[in-house]
Image: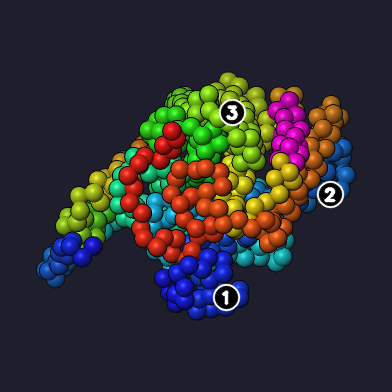
Amino acid sequence: MSQEKHHIMSYTTHLIVLGVLLILTAVSVAVTSLELGALSTLVAMLIAGVKAAIVLVWFMHLKFDNKLYTIFTVFVLVLFLLVLYVTFFDYSYR
Amino acid sequence: MSETTSSKHVSFLQYKGKYKGILGWILSTDHKRVGLLYLYTMLVFFSLAAILGLLMKLQLIAPGYTIMGPQTYNAMFTVHGIIMIFIIVVPGLPAVFGNFFLPIMIGAKDVAFPRLNLASWWIYVIGILVVLTSQFVGGWPDTGWTFYAPYSFQTPANVLPALFGAFILGFSSILTGINFVVTVHRMRAPGMSWFKMPLFPWTLYATAWVQILATPVIGITLLLTVMERVLGVGVFDPALGGDPILYQHLFWIYSHPAVYIMILPGMGAISEILPVFSQKRIYGYKAIVLSSLAIAFVGYFVWGHHMFTSGMSGRALYAFSFLTFIVAIPSAIKVFNWVSTMYKGSLNLQTPFYWATSFIFVFMIGGLTGLVLGSLATNVHVHDTHFVVAHFHFIVFGGTGFSFMAALHYWFPKMFGRMYDANWANTGWAVFFSGFLTLYLPMFYLGIQGMPRRYYDYLPEFHGGNIISSLGAILMIAGAMIIIVNLVRSSRHGQKTSDKNPWGGRTLEWETDTPPTLENWDEIPNVTEEPYEYK
């Protein structure tokens, strides 16, 4: 453990990430005023997905950590997407 | 390790740490003591839930009111289900034998996060207390253990504490999963590559991922149900634009993988026991490893087979039915491997072997009847009948319960440094096994005849099957009592043994002291051989 490098991120990067997250939050609220029908859920999920990815990559240091963690995270996200896909497979043909 | 080490060579049972008496147990971060804490807790609640099950079967011994009315019966099967599922079989083998043996089997001194491990047990106890609150304050819930919407937010029964309790129990499961994943990744002994790791730790590893990834879904679902009940948010309420089938999707997205949380470690334990009692290398080690991972992965995508009659789209029905048949393949691979392991082996007919082989027998019946339920056409006929109850108990009780008993009889001398009375153990197994079959086999027939589940009453034509089934329940409880009394008595008064390896096993736990010392090893072992190297 002691041999692993610890990356320290600057305050500027933190603030940029915070700003992007806040902007995306505003976008996800603004998007609800558009009449997108069935796509509204997809758009909301996409924005939330981008926000989660930003948190994972920068705030949670995935970008600077062992690649094994990235592989596990991507695997989990793929699994999550497949579960979502199968769920919506029911709804889209009902 | 928070305890002060007074002597390295005192067994963990005798070890005197910072705290004495009961505090020395409930505040101990030793993985072995935490494992035994789970065992004792489960023993108490298993006994309680088994009595509830027996009372239900006594009610069904004759049509009409026998010993309870419909509301009591509804409450009984709800509480029986909640206790058995959330308190016994979901934590099950990982909490007891995983905690006790995972570090030892991979050559570690403890799990990666010992304090978190103890916290998991405390959260588990708090969850139990909250669940029990519903039994004594405000009356029993009557929704069944599945808490299906919209009934769960409409019933006047006391559902909230049970929902909260199940929610809290989920945290314990997640924390145990995190602990096991990190332990397996970071704490394997030198030389223990992934494919030199024994099969029980492999299945614990696969299970831990399911615990981590699936349990949050049930947590969110139960919270949404609480919000539906308290705030009327409308997610599942059709009157407010919600969808009750969404509840079923969310519930089973967790609860079907949860079946693999229950069964995979059991399969791991059986994979440990059969080579030892056949004195033969396990057949197809890598096939068992890969099939465990395949079960854990594919098991995520079959949840819809619980909902074939709920109103899903036709295409979703076909997809879920297909995926259900796919998941049968890795399970069948394991069965072929177990049978091939025994083939031409030098069989040692001891109690753990009896439990292990009877596990295969009942698990096969459970698995094959699962195909009847996974097939769309036949599912419509037997859905919500006693056929489902029989299938469920063959898988969950037959699978998890039998493998739990196999594991307990297998590792008992290592855990307690004493041997149980083998004659009583064999008698207990024979009575229990006979009772199990007599109890559940008639239910298949009753289900095909059309007897619905979850009713306290039935038509006269179902009487014969119910008499046999109820007598089977009495027999099975008698067997369980023989087993429990024998094991509890033997843990205190059984013949002492310090034999490190009474069964002739080849995995690392048989190289430690019996019972193990506080830190398991004086020196971390260096692994050079593959597991199950029988000459």
Q: How is the image coloured?
A: rainbow
Q: Please, what is the three-letter code of the amino acid marked with disc 1?
A: Leu
Specify whether B215 is left or right of B414.
left
Specify the amino acid type for callout 2: Met
Q: In the rendered image, which quarter contains the C terminus of chain B?
A: top left
Badge 3 is on which residue?
B364
Q: Nearer the viewer, residue B12 or B72?
A: B12
Rendering coords of residue B189 (x, y %): 34, 53
Mark 3–mark 1 distance (CA, rounded to whole Å):
43 Å
Q: State which quarter of the image contains the N terminus of chain B.
A: bottom left
- Which mark is drawn over residue B344? none
| Depth check, front residue: B429 or B468 | B429
Q: Distance between the residues labelled 2 and 1?
A: 41 Å
Tell me if I can see residue B134 in this picture: no
For image coordinates 44% across by 29% down, the residue present is B283
Q: Residue at x 34, y 48 (%)?
A: B527
Q: Which of B459 and B254 is in front in this view?
A: B254
Horizontal placement of A68 versus B196: left or right? left
Amino acid carrying label 3: it is Met
Q: Magenta span covers which residues?
A: B427-445
Looking at marks 3 and 2 on the same chain, the residue that comes earlier in the sequence is marked by 2
Q: Distance between the residues labelled 3 and 2?
A: 34 Å
Q: Name the residue under label 1.
A: B23
- Mark 2 vs mark 1: which is more N-terminal? 1
